[in-house]
Amino acid sequence: QVLLVESGGGLVQAGGSLRLSCVVSGRTFSNYAMGWFRRALGKEREFVAGISRSGVKTFSADSMKSRFTISRDNAKNTVYLQMNSLKPEDTAVYYCAAGAAGELGGPRSKYDYWGQGTQVTVSS
């Protein structure tokens, strides 16, 4: 069993920054590609960014790639999402996910394990 625990969410003003973290336990972290998704109230869960097992390759949604950066530290079993220039429309619950197949990007079927999510609220 793989356990994913997100942290770092909170309330921030528009234009601000947050860094989300996701700590993974239970299996060898470097065996998994990792991804971040988000779900805004009343909307479907959408892909934000993905990163390869080694961290060399990343893939981000076009609408967010200029502001959001995914990274990982395999020594710490942690994946990060740096979010800059936040907008009210970024308000959502953010989830990290682990994929054993090692594939990047959406859809959600590429990922086998999910965290419980962390709330990000951006005020205008």
Image: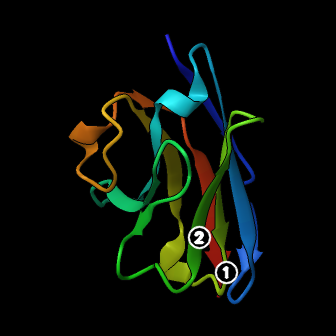
Q: Quadrant of the C terminus?
A: bottom right
Q: Considering only order in the chain, which callout, 2 or 1, is on the residue closer to the N terminus?
A: 2
Residue 23: image tag: none
Q: For the residue marked with disc 2, what is the amino acid?
A: Thr
Disc 1 + disc 2, Cβ < 8 Å: yes
> Image point 45% across, 79% down: which residue?
64
Label 1 SS: loop
Q: What's the residue at 30%, 32% (across, down)?
A: 101
The colour mode here is rainbow
Which residue is drawn at the image coordinates 70% and 89% (left, top)? 15
The residue carrying mark 1 is 84
Residue indicated by mark 2: 69
Q: How many numbered marks are there?
A: 2
Horizontal side of 17 relative to 93 (left or right) equals right
Please state the horizontal and vertical placement of residue 81, each as a whole percent of the image.
Answer: 62, 60
Amino acid type, label 1: Asn
Residue 76: image quadrant is top right
99 to 108, vertically: above or below: above
Q: CA distance from mark 1 to mark 2?
A: 9 Å
Where does the image place residue 107, in percent across and percent down from the top left? Answer: 23, 50
